[in-house]
């Protein structure tokens, strides 16, 4: 693999959600450890599942992977980091200042901005604290999905510049209170990230136009902040030899090869590797050790490591499912095989239930790469086709709604909450209103305040609130950012709700906050999107737990791109279909009150006609 040759000390893996960054980062750490290098594997993703992949508990401290000599791991837990950050700031004043003042400080520190700053603190420490990392030859970073990775990698410059200018009368003074003493650490982080002999960034993509276009954009943005040592890994490429005689597999191969033949210009000159799609789930050491090997090498090592793969190969099993199922057949099979399973539906049947209210908010949530954008577009198109006014929007920095829709439709409007755009609009609005009556000195202080990195949190929350208010008169379908960052947005929503309750709760005045709207099942339907694979289902279950903790009950689950619901004869696809059954059973019996099963399709669901067909699959 090119990206492993002469590996520098720091390796970053980034890319659009769901492309396999965690698996490749874990496999890389294993390979470097096998070469007798001391390795620290770090996840900076708020929805980290590194521990799940290894089958151990890691958490927010450096933990040795006992079964792998030379390997340790760390998951930066944003919530734990934020709590420790709050304790450092609030602890010294607790019992000194009045309780009301302390509560005000705690409220100021409850938002997503504090979480980002705290996680960033830990991230930069790993880049700069020699004592913390001196025992390791390599530090491998499994990062959050692209948009927020770029945000984090830009932060050393952003925070350093902000500190250099002086933070002034910042509206989020609480979260920023601890930054001044970090100035030296942040400058050192900038230097480490910009040093090509120290740092290599690996862009991970799939053989899909959307993820490769995202990689091309990421390439340009990161090169612009000094990260020039970039490599490209295209993961999950379907091996042509496994497609013989299977129309679905052959269609996938043709589609992928056409995409690979037309790589974006920005990526053509990058050192590039391809990793084949595997038949087995990438959980456990045996599976991870085979990820970076070719099919031939896998065959040689099959007997040696078979017990670790989490499932036998189709050729060795009589349990591989027939290759002749449609959506209803797969649903019938899972409901028959699983006693007491809730009723499953095709997507159009779920839309029937959504349409019954005549208006409302529909939010699709889940791990990156599970197909939220496509499903949000399909639901919006189906509702608009039925004559309902629909506003389709996204809060995902890496979303590609217009590319997915590839056209216009009566009754359907489309928007995107772009963090940069809404932040600039918010700054302009505040300067035009609050700043209009200020003198030059006062305006300068206000402009300095608005350069605070926390301004983006306020702006995005306000844009989100404006969009979902429309749901009282029409359908609003919201495609959200990947799980961890959606929860940060909900955290801001909760902070606003608590502030409103504190201010207005005792006045008798009627008010409705965005959080109250999300908690009302008549106004909001949350659809959790997953794939029938171990990690996406685990993350979806954790997301459901977090939502319930916030008083929000998910309305349905959607299992997307199911091979078990498709017609397959390829041995590789039959084994993947067989592997899905356990996860489908888990969703139907443990997690979902209602669910839809959407099959893997020969043609990508792009354009109005195919999106409408997607919702009708299996009917």
Image (tube, grey):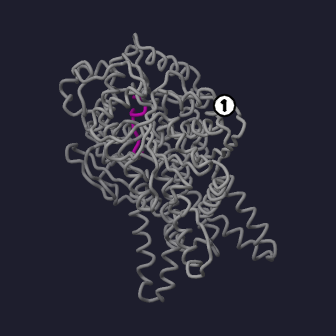
Residue 502, x across and y down, in percent: 54, 78
Query: What residue is disc 1 on?
Result: 406
Residue at horizontal 70 percent and vertical 34 percent from the top: 409
Residue at horizontal 69 percent and vertical 52 percent from the top: 421
Left-right relation of 527 to 319: right
Magenta highlight: main SS: loop
Q: Which residues are magenta?
A: 1-10
Q: Is residue 204 above or below residue 564?
A: below
Whether residue 286 is visible here, answered yes or no, is: yes
Q: Is residue 192 above or below residue 303?
A: below
In-front residue for pair 155/344: 344
Residue at horizontal 47 percent and vertical 36 percent from the top: 204
Residue 258 on the magenta span: no
Residue 246, x across and y down, in percent: 41, 14
Q: Quadrant of residue 167?
A: bottom right
**Mark 1 closeness class: few <14, some 14–19, many ≥20 residues within 10 Å:** few
Residue 133, x across and y down, in percent: 34, 55
Q: Residue furthest top?
A: 245
Residue 4 on the magenta span: yes
């Amino acid at each position: 693999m090119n990206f492993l040759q002469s590996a520098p000390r720091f390796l970053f893996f980034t890319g659009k959600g769901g492309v396999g960054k965690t698996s490749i980062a874990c496999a890389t750490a294993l390979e470097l450890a096998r070469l007798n290098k001391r390795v620290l594997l770090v996840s900076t993703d708020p929805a980290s599942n590194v521990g799940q992949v290894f089958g151990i508990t890691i958490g927010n401290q450096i933990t040795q992977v006992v079964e792998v000599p030379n390997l340790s791991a760390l998951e930066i837990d944003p919530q734990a980091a934020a709590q420790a950050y709050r304790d450092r700031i609030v602890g010294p004043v607790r019992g000194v200042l009045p309780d009301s003042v302390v509560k005000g400080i705690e409220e100021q520190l409850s938002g997503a901005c504090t979480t980002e700053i705290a996680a960033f603190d830990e991230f930069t420490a790993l880049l700069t604290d020699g004592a913390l990392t001196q025992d390791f030859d390599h530090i491998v970073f499994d990062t959050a999905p692209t948009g927020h990775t770029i945000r984090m990698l830009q932060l050393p410059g952003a925070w350093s510049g902000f500190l250099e200018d002086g933070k002034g009368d910042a509206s989020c003074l609480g979260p920023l209170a601890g930054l001044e003493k970090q100035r030296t650490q942040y400058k050192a982080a900038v230097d480490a990230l910009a040093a090509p002999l120290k740092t290599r960034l690996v862009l991970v993509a799939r053989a899909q136009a959307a993820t490769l276009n995202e990689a091309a954009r990421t390439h340009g943005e990161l090169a612009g902040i000094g990260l020039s040592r970039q490599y490209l890994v295209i993961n999950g490429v379907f091996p042509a030899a496994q497609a013989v005689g299977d129309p679905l597999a052959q269609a996938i191969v043709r589609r992928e090869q056409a995409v690979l033949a037309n790589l974006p210009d920005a990526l053509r000159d990058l050192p590039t590797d391809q990793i084949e799609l595997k038949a087995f789930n990438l959980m456990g050491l045996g599976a991870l050790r085979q990820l970076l090997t070719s099919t031939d090498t896998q065959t040689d090592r099959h007997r040696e490591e078979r017990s670790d793969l989490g499932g036998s190969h189709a050729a060795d099993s009589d349990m591989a499912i027939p290759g002749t199922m449609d959506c209803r057949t797969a649903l019938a099979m899972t409901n028959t095989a699983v006693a007491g399973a809730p009723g499953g539906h095709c997507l159009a049947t779920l839309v029937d239930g959504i349409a019954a209210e005549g208006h409302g908010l529909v939010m699709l949530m889940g791990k990156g790469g599970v197909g939220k954008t496509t499903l949000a577009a399909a639901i919006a198109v189906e509702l608009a086709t039925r004559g309902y006014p629909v506003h389709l929007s996204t809060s995902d920095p890496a979303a590609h709604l217009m590319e997915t829709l590839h056209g216009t439709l009566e009754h359907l409007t489309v928007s995107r909450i772009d963090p940069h755009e809404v932040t600039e609009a918010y700054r302009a609005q505040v300067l035009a209103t609050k700043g209009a009556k200020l003198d030059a000195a006062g305006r300068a202080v206000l402009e300095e305040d608005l350069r605070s990195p926390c301004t983006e949190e306020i702006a995005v929350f306000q844009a989100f609130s404006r969009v979902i208010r429309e749901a009282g008169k029409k359908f609003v379908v919201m495609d959200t950012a990947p799980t961890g960052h959606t929860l940060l947005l909900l955290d801001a929503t909760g902070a606003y709700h608590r502030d409103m309750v504190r201010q207005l709760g005792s006045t008798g005045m009627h008010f409705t906050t965005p959080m109250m709207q999300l908690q009302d099942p008549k106004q909001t339907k949350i659809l959790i999107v997953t794939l029938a694979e171990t990690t996406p289902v685990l993350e979806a279950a954790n997301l459901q737990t977090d939502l319930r903790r916030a008083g929000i009950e998910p309305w349905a689950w959607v299992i997307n791109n199911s091979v078990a619901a498709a017609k397959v004869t390829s041995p590789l696809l039959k084994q993947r279909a067989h592997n899905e059954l356990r996860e489908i059973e888990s969703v139907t019996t443990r997690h979902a009150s209602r669910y839809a099963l959407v099959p893997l399709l020969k043609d990508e669901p792009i354009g109005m006609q195919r999106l409408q067909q997607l919702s009708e699959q299996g009917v």
